[in-house]
Amino acid sequence: MQFALSEEQVAFRDAVRELLTAQCPPAVLRSAWPDGDPAGVDRLWAALVELDLPAALVPEPAGGLGLDETDLVALLEEVGRAAVPLPVAEHVLVAAPLLAAVDHPRLPDVVAGRVRVTVTGPDGLAPYGGRADLVLTLTGTAARLAPAPTGAVLPTVDGSRALIRCDDPGDLLTTDPELLAVSRLRTDLADAAQLVGLARRMLDLTVGYVGQRRQFGVPVGSFQAVKHHLAEALLRLELAVPTVRAAAWSVARRTPERDADVSAAVLLAVDAARTMARTAIQCHGAIGYTVEYDLHLYAKRTWAVAARCDPDAHLDRLAGALDLEAVPT
């Protein structure tokens, strides 16, 4: 299995990174919170559309780029690293290929980015629903598509996610078990990849800070305790990265181990991102606890994404794949 990215994958990833560095700075994230100016967010979406990102996972005969999950995972790490306040992962990795598979009439609009699609969780909550036109709902037996509700955005720890509740099940798309299974795996894979990117962003912010913040005449990053905290967080991140990419490979090739591989990726990504958020705040000292500080934009996104991952369910699935028996309580 090849974990290193190909030259084409690196080029696409770098193009996305360059775009997000320019178009999605912390100021744009702050503008995505309630009462902010959405103009910067809309410009960001338009720029992503120019890169043909909405068409990435759609087959070429349907007007897409014909890429697969192994191509997308590095791009979604960048989306997470920038904490993009749009349903990019939901639209690109989940909704667009599913609509292509059922030959839905709205597919051309989705591929062209004229409409945005998000995906509800099991609780009926749709992240970025306040900036989406359509909502895809995945249940155990069916996938449905509905117009995004126009109600008020719900208050959450991360206001940039524009979370809404969608009670309208919408029109039936498919009951095909394989399409439903793959779509749910892609949803989990998208969360894992974004958590890896968020962890990387918080690490970069922290290393930069402890390198320039001085105490007792030296950078605080030279203190052994700080080094150990960051080394432990980095170790967890470096373990999560290849696991997430292996899960993408497994989903792309529909291997029998795909469920277990995705669950392992989610569990390690959640652990790495949560550990990194805690470590970053601690290593920043007092300023790390100041909610107006940029670090909190990425920590809050981490907590929000990790909260919907349901680690217990993934532990159960992974234990089942390994034939582990439940321990009596």
Image (cartoon, rainbow, N blue to C red):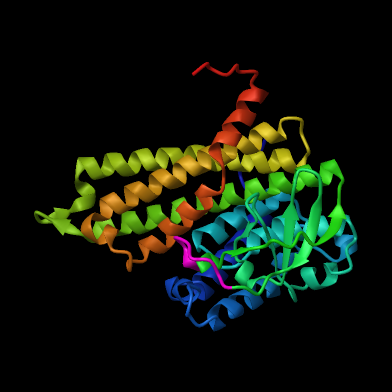
Against 184, residue 98 (above or below) is below
Q: Position of residue 204 (x, y in %)?
A: 39, 56
> What residue do we see at 19% from left, 45% from top?
223
Total marks in image: 0
Q: Position of residue 324 (x, y in %)?
A: 60, 18
Magenta-tinted stretch? 152-159
Q: Is residue 82 magenta?
A: no
Q: Quadrant of the N terminus?
A: top right
Residue 220 at what x, y percent from top left? 20, 52
Determine if residue 327 is in view.
yes
Q: Which residue lies at the image location 76% right of the left edge and 30% below the top edge?
A: 256
The answer to whether 183 is drawn above or below residue 314 in the figure is below
- Which sits in the foreground, 106 or 165? 165
Q: Quadrant of residue 252?
A: top right
Seen from the viewer's position, the closer of residues 105 and 214 is: 105
**Residue 86, image quadrant:** bottom right
Main SS, magenta region, reads loop
Does residue 66 appear anywhere in the picture?
no
Residue 122 percent across, percent down from the top left: 65, 49
277 displayed left or right of 245: left
Residue visible at 48% across and 65% down?
Answer: 155
- Does residue 157 show up magenta in the picture? yes
Give the residue furthest to the left.
216
Height in image: 310 above or below 290? above
Quarter where residue 16 is shown: bottom right
Q: Vertically, is 50 above or below 226?
A: below
